[in-house]
């Protein structure tokens, strides 16, 4: 079923973050969704369920999150752009197949609208407690990309970025929203179709008989084919050679997993998006992401009124972690302050990179609500001493 | 005539409150859309989202600003709309000392207003019922509120409605809004404490 409804709703809208995420996916060409509804991500699925039938997309409500993740991997190999959406409990169930996505180098998007945990925790209230799970949730060594939006507009924009990165590097990309941003409503401007940057799938165009699924291009990423196009190929979660067949030995493991890691690490500078404000001569730099960035802006403004030289570094890309930039900043500032709605997750990476070159201060929160800006302010003032 | 726009250049914090089912969040959505899409301002809406929002006290928080809104939460509202006694009891004390208080007259029995508070009452629900359904009370209140606060031009509010309510109810909602607006203008021409 297809109608005359345009896929890209060019213009200005008043949307919440969940709706904006759904529209971003549609705008960048996602046409397969498999998921299992869970608060606070349900509105993304609702919006897609409403819109997909009108624009020729496929929406499947799955039996659970294991199946959802498996289905989007399969859809990607059938040639579509695919996504799923969940929150903490569902994210846990998806981990095994996120690893399969990393191992088979399958482009797809997982959106996690985070709520407080562990377990079913706080279904309707916010948290940022899945950030380390995003990085290390599946077993084995692999690199992943995770982005964190701070506004509905960014939910739209960064969903597009996630798909583009996923196609470019052939890796599952995670959009780590938080409940506050998912349920916040603001103006979202959708550009004209031609103004939206779209990374299309990197198709293999060589001779059919010469096709090997895991022969990388110069940047370490192999081009792809899809099922039904008369290519003979094999993909597996087992360690595999360039033909895609299992080879169970240390040499192949080194080559196979080595490339999964390197294609992200070697391109980290191109992948990482940061936003820096007044870090030049700052005594204290607040490092934050998601809703915590916006909460921190109040503390930063208050600290500046008190004469403290404070800057801000926002992690739009959380994984891969901006190690290089943190090292540079740690060398020239007194203290890095990090507010997180968890007990210190991304902070561990921050502390590791600062290597004692400057003080680091965590402003933790158990979740359910955002920080009191005064708690961040206190840490800034202590850090400046 | 009192213009809140002149007093509060920059940023206004508005809290809509009542009980679940009154269309409290819808009021925030319509005003937020009016401000950000049709009045060239920034507007951020956040809402209490939880089991407590189903039938119990319910609220929506809206910031309308000339500048980009970074910190998205209210510190102390400049304007408070109360559509239930529980909401009034819960939120009134946090209204700014020179804030504007809007009250659903049949559903809230207010105590005497604090010294500098400007308090306006309207029979929003009764007007909605006269129009056929109390569900229109929220748009009566929104029109009324806009008339006394002038937070967005009336035209922006009207334009913001389509898409926010089912198409077949746009007309009636516009009438409700208009009625509220007229009552608001009327109130302004009298003393505010009525």
Image: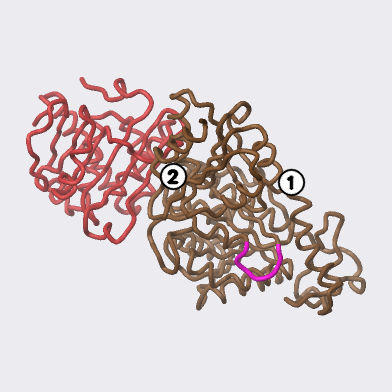
Chain colours: A brown, B red
Residue at 86 percent across and 66 percent down: it is A215
Q: Which residues are magenta?
A: A136-142
Q: Left of A261 or right of it: where is A1? A: left
Quadrant of the frame with the C terminus of chain B: top left
Quadrant of the frame with the N terminus of chain B: top left
Label 1 vs label 2: CA separation?
32 Å
How far across and how far down the image is residue A47, in percent? 47, 59
How far across and how far down the image is residue A78, in percent? 70, 71
How far across and how far down the image is residue A245, in percent? 83, 78
Please say whether residue B37 is visible from this viewpoint: no
Determine the main secondary structure of the stretch shown in magenta: loop
Q: Are marks 1 and 2 on the same chain?
A: yes
Label 1 vs 2, first from the N-terminus: 2
- For mark 2, name the chain: A
Q: Nearer the viewer, residue B177 or B56?
A: B56
- For mark 1, name the chain: A
Which quadrant of the view contains residue A280? top right
How far across and how far down the image is residue B101, in percent? 19, 35
Question: Disc 1 designates what residue?
Answer: A270
Residue B160 in the image: above or below residue A169: above
Residue A24 in the image: above or below residue A385: below
Residue A302 drawn in magenta: no
Q: Residues within 10 Å of mark 1 (few under 14, many from 20)?
A: few
Give the number of the disc on residue A14. Answer: 2
Q: Nearer the viewer, residue B129 or A359?
A: A359
Q: Secondary structure at mark 1?
A: helix
Residue at 27 percent across and 25 percent down: it is B4
Q: Secondary structure at mark 2?
A: strand
Residue at 78 percent across and 57 percent down: it is A263
Residue A267 in the image: above or below residue B141: below
Q: Left of B45 or right of it: where is B97? A: left
Q: Residues within 10 Å of mark 2 (few under 14, many from 20)?
A: many
């Amino acid at each position: 079923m297809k109608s005359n409804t345009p896929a890209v709703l060019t213009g200005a809208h008043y949307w919440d973050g969940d709706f904006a995420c759904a529209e971003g996916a549609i705008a960048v060409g996602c046409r397969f969704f498999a998921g299992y509804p869970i608060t606070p991500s349900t509105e993304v699925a609702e919006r897609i369920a409403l819109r997909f039938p009108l624009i020729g997309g496929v929406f499947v409500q799955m039996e659970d999150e294991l199946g959802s993740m498996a289905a989007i991997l399969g859809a990607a190999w059938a040639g579509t752009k695919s996504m799923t959406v969940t929150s903490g409990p569902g994210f846990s169930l998806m981990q095994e197949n996120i690893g399969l996505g990393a191992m088979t180098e399958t482009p797809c998007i997982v959106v996690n609208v985070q709520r407080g945990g562990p377990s079913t925790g706080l279904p309707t209230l916010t948290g940022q407690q899945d950030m380390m799970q995003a990085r290390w949730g599946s077993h084995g060594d692999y690199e992943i990309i995770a982005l964190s939006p701070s506004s509905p507009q960014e939910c739209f924009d960064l969903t597009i970025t996630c798909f583009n990165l996923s196609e470019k590097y052939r890796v599952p990309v995670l959009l780590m929203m938080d409940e506050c941003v998912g349920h916040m409503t603001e103006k979202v401007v959708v550009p004209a179709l031609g103004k939206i940057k779209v990374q299309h799938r990197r198709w293999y165009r060589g001779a059919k008989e010469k096709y090997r699924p895991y022969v990388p291009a110069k940047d370490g990423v192999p081009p792809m084919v899809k099922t039904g196009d008369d290519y003979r190929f094999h993909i597996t979660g087992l360690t595999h050679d360039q033909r895609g067949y299992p080879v169970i030995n240390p040499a192949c493991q080194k080559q196979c997993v080595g490339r999964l890691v390197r294609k992200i690490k070697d391109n980290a500078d191109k992948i990482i998006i940061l936003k820096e404000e007044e870090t030049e001569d700052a005594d204290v730099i607040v490092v934050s992401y998601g809703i915590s960035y916006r909460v921190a802006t109040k503390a930063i403004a208050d600290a500046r009124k008190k004469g403290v030289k404070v800057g801000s570094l926002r992690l739009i890309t959380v994984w891969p972690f901006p190690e290089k930039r943190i090292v540079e900043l740690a060398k020239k500032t007194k203290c890095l302050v990090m507010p997180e709605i968890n007990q210190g997750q991304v902070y561990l990476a921050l502390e590791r990179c600062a290597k004692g070159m400057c003080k680091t201060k965590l402003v933790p929160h158990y979740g359910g609500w955002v920080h009191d800006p005064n708690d961040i302010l206190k840490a800034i003032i202590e850090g400046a001493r | 005539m009192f213009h809140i726009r002149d007093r509060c250049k920059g940023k206004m914090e508005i809290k809509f409150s009542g009980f679940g089912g009154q269309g409290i969040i819808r009021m925030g959505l319509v005003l937020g859309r009016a401000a950000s899409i049709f009045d060239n301002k920034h507007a951020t809406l956040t809402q209490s989202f939880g089991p407590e929002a189903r039938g119990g006290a319910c609220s929506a928080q809206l910031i309308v600003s000339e500048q980009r809104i970074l910190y998205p939460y209210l510190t102390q509202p400049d304007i408070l709309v109360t559509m239930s006694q529980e909401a009034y009891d819960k939120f009134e004390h946090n209204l700014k000392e020179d804030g504007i208080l809007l009250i659903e007259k049949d559903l809230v029995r207010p105590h005497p207003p604090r010294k500098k508070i400007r308090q306006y009452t309207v029979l929003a629900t009764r007007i909605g019922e006269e129009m056929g359904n109390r569900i229109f009370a929220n748009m009566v209140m929104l029109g009324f509120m806009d008339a006394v606060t002038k937070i967005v031009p009336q035209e922006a509010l009207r334009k913001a409605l389509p898409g926010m309510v089912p198409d077949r109810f746009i007309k009636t909602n516009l009438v409700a809004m208009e009625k509220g607006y007229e009552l608001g203008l009327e109130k302004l021409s009298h003393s505010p404490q009525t």
